[in-house]
Image (tube, rainbow, N blue to C red):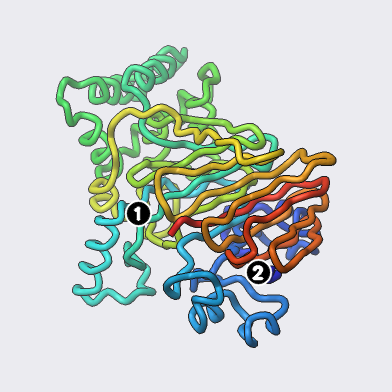
Amino acid sequence: MFIPLTNTPRDYAWGSRTAIAELLGTEASGGPEAELWLGAHPGSPARILEPELTGGADTLAAWIDADPAAAGLREPRLPFLLKLLAADAPLSLQAHPSPAQALAGFERENAAGIPLDAPNRNYKDAFHKPELIVALSDTFDALCGFRTVADAADDVDRLLDVPGLDAAATNQLREFRARLTGPDADALRALVEHLLTDDVTALVSAVTEAAASAPITPAVATVNRLAEFYSGDPGIVVSLLLNSVTLRRGGVLYLPAGNIHAYLRGFGVELMAASDNVLRGGLTPKHIDVPELLSVLDFHPLPIPYLEPEPAGAGAARFAPDIPDFELVHVTGLGGESSRLGLPGPAIAIITEGEVTLAGTSARRVLTRGDVVYVTPDEGPLTVSGAGELFLATTRL
């Protein structure tokens, strides 16, 4: 079956007021529209447009709960969540736990009697939350993972070279650089803990002041942008320790467990394991738990975590990280050809440009920009044709 879906965008304050509505071809709400959730997560399950196909169930979550086998699942849980994400302001500095960390944290907070909807709850479920993001906008800016100490120190040196800094600001920057390049093997962890738990108001002020006049590098540009939205937040200084990346349209990042990151600006397709476990350290008015964040972080310097595609047929590329929860197929530029896609499990497809025809073993649908369908695995393999762009999320679980 091909089951048409829709949903209402989430109105988080950092969201764009236009991007999601323009893609869907709907009237903008007038407020921020940050994320469109296309899945069965209870926080915002997708609505079913033709409930006669699902025995009257009007949301994807209700249908999967009632009849997982009909949805192509072995248990009543869809393991992935597909989203449109549109950020006009930076998101929180955050990381996600591994499966073992998520299960332990969930059980620990349950035993402590913390309600699932409590604002100080870290673990809302027992699942990990790796994720990938594909840029739909011309550029998509993000922070992701720790970079080398040498690279971070180079940017601190650029701040120290800014003329006209007063003695107090200069001393703050020199002390920060000394901590950064200390001989202790755990110096980076200790520095991040210091930045996120101690009073570093003077250092944040010094970094912000120097960056406003420093030669622009990706790290300096990030400091300046964060200061616009989160003046005085220690996450501004932490950003100097992280990889800054600008994706071009179609570029993909994969954020595994323990990778500290923050999306800064842009519009994209996001695919993640269906979890709500987010550990935050700054750049947000939401709950922050620094000790818990530090317990899951990977402090090793890492290259920018681009995810490279695998060929998946004519005009199709598959992005398959090293987990079974999800994979994403991107189909574009078919011209007069068609592409044949295998389906390892149930899928959700969204059309982001043009018109595409999906044909399965028993059903066929013509989809246009903004259309979304749930595809049961008995329709596979799928034939995709037309002049458009399609993203198809599926699972190997």
x, y (%) of residue 108?
20, 67
Residue situated furthest left in the rendering: 184
Query: For the residue labelled by badge 2, is the local secondary structure a helix, a strand or a loop?
Result: loop
- Label 1 vs label 2: CA separation? 26 Å
Query: For the residue labelled by badge 1, is the local secondary structure a helix, a strand or a loop?
Result: strand
x, y (%) of residue 253?
51, 38
**Front label number (1 vs 2):** 2
User: What residue is pinned by disc 2?
Assistant: 7
Q: Residue at x 25, y 56 (%)?
A: 100
Residue 82 vertical position relative to residue 167 in the rendered view, above or below: below
Amino acid type shown at disc 1: Leu
Q: Residue at x 41, y 28 (%)?
A: 207
Residue 187 vertical position relative to residue 21 in the rendered view, above or below: above
Q: Residues within 10 Å of mark 2 (few under 14, many from 20)?
A: some
Q: Residue at x 39, y 44 (%)?
A: 256
> Residue 279: which numbered mark, if any?
1
